[in-house]
Image: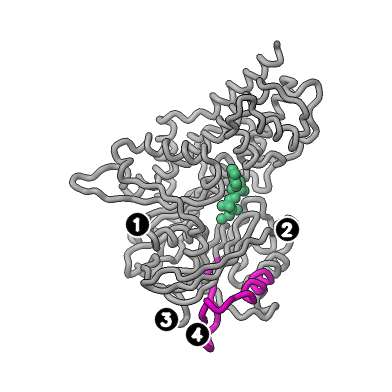
Amino acid sequence: SGRWAKAEAILRELEEKCGTPTAKLRQVADAMTVEMHAGLASEGGSKLKMLISYVDNLPTGDEKGLFYALDLGGTNFRVMRVQLGGKDGIIKQESEEVSIPPHLMVGSSHELFDFIAAALAKFVDTEGEDFHLPPGRQRELGFTFSFPVRQLSLASGTLIKWTKGFLIEDAVGEDVVGELTKAMERLGLDMRVAALVNDTVGTLAGGRYNNPDVIAAVILGTGTNAAYVERAHAIPKWQGLLPKSGEMVINMEWGNFRSSHLPLTEFDQTLDVESLNPGEQIFEKIISGMYLGEIVRRVLCRMAEEASFFGDTIPPKLKIPFILRTPDMSAMHHDTSPDLKVVGSKLKDILEVPNSSLKMRKIIVEICDIVATRGARLSAAGILGILKKLGRDAVKEGEKQRSVIALDGGLFEHYTKFRNCMESTLKELLGDVAENIIVEHSNDGSGIGAALLAASHSQYL
Ligand code: ADP
Ligand code: MG
């Protein structure tokens, strides 16, 4: 019938607009490399902020002692303590996850940091005898804060802007370490922030601790971002002394990348316009976990309106932004049952569509596939951009340098089809070099990485 023909037409149009042929991915990678150069050349020189992390030494394995870490980046935050044993490695670690009440994500700075400090204080109270703080010492913390920060030193930095559904205006421009420290003081928690790091930088540090070939880290979670090790002399905007190591970790903030080569659709445009941060984080909005399910919802809305995809009425629930979460999209996408019963039950539970035909379910799986494939392939192009910047995208005569990229984030970890597509696309782009480039899952690397950086910047060294 005409209804199916119209739905089919919308689907084919989506597929075409989301297309990422290899040639296009190479253009995206080249544009990423160009923007990296521009962002390193001058402050504000590019949409890529290429933030200087002040991390000029990555963990060596000699780090020792008890350190805490706090990871704030999405809907959850994590507190962690780790007993580092130098050459004996990690002796013991414990962590706890706390979800952030949604009203605190759009409230005041004071309230958010009080909540965080309180959870941290509660966690410190449960420290057992396996952890050892030498008498008279202050506890020290690595603070992983996964929003763009202009660092003033390794342990201070001002918030540039919020992303990923956070919007707390009075915190913008403030030193987030100062905010956390004041909240800890209000509670009487005696702890010093020894390092402030982005989650990408933490993941890079955690990854390097386990593998000396790690040169970059990428997060695919609620948002997306990357960090890598740059040669200090290749950072023209760096005014300070050159670090002894000759290296500096750069937090790219690649979520804010945008290029005319990106395949964008009407759905991306309206998602962006109606978001908390219109015009910003365009790369993030087509790749990351916060948005993929929402893109699918928007496609389904159009099908419902223009092709009566769900029948004569539009399911009211379908009108609610963000009601279709990426984990639900992923579950539908991975449905292998012959009658796609997972898709059927998601439609019923989330959108209150009681009956769905197999034909409808198949179309929905196709939408998921198109949207996830575009995100996965573009993230591979981003990684190629980094490798190109470092000259590691080609085999050098007589050299066999291995490059390891540490990957983390819930999207990478749990969305198998996304992850497989990202990895196979990277191979496709790299050709012969693929054997020297390794993608490694760095589980919880960012928390441990922050603790390691706190250890190497302890006041007691
Ligand atoms: P954050 O990025 O907030 O620090 P995570 O790295 O844990 O936290 O990523 C969480 C995100 O990962 C979620 O917002 C969701 O988008 C995505 N995610 C989690 N589980 C799944 C899943 N099963 N399938 C697809 N995406 C998932
Ligand atoms: Mg995270």
Pick whichever, 326 or 381, lies toward us.
326
Label 2 – label 3 distance at C-alpha:
38 Å
Crowdedness of circle 3 by 10 Å Cα count: few (<14), some, many (20+)? few
Image marks 2 and 1: residues in contact by CB distance under 8 Å: no
- Residue 132 lies within the magenta run: yes
Q: Determine whether the residue tagged by mark 3 lies in a helix, strand or loop.
A: loop
Find out if the beta carbon at label 2 lies less than 8 Å from the nearest ligand 1 atom: no
Label 3 – label 1 distance at C-alpha:
30 Å
Q: Is residue 398 left or right of residue 189?
A: left
Task: From the image, tell me which residue sits under label 3.
Answer: 461
> In terms of image quadrants, where is residue 186?
bottom right
Image marks 1 and 4: residues in contact by CB distance under 8 Å: no
Crowdedness of circle 4 by 10 Å Cα count: few (<14), some, many (20+)? few
Q: Determine whether the residue tagged by mark 1 lies in a helix, strand or loop.
A: helix
Q: Residue shown at 70%/11% (left/top)?
A: 1
In this rendering, the answer to whether 74 lies above or below 270 is: below
Q: Residue shown at 52%/69% (left/top)?
A: 142
Pick whichever, 72 or 78, lies toward us.
78
Image marks 3 and 4: residues in contact by CB distance under 8 Å: no
Q: Determine whether the residue tagged by mark 2 lies in a helix, strand or loop.
A: loop
Q: Amino acid at mark 1?
A: Ala
Label 3 – label 4 distance at C-alpha:
13 Å
Q: Position of residue 232 (x, y in %)?
A: 35, 61
**Which residues are drawn in magenta?**
117-143
Q: Residue furthest left?
A: 398
Q: Amino acid at mark 4?
A: Pro
Mark 2 or mark 3: whose residue is earlier in sequence: 2
Mark 3 or mark 1: whose residue is earlier in sequence: 1
Question: In the drawing, what numbered circle is on residue 134?
Answer: 4
Image marks 2 and 4: residues in contact by CB distance under 8 Å: no
Q: Is residue 179 visible?
A: no
Task: From the image, tell me which residue sits under label 2.
Answer: 101
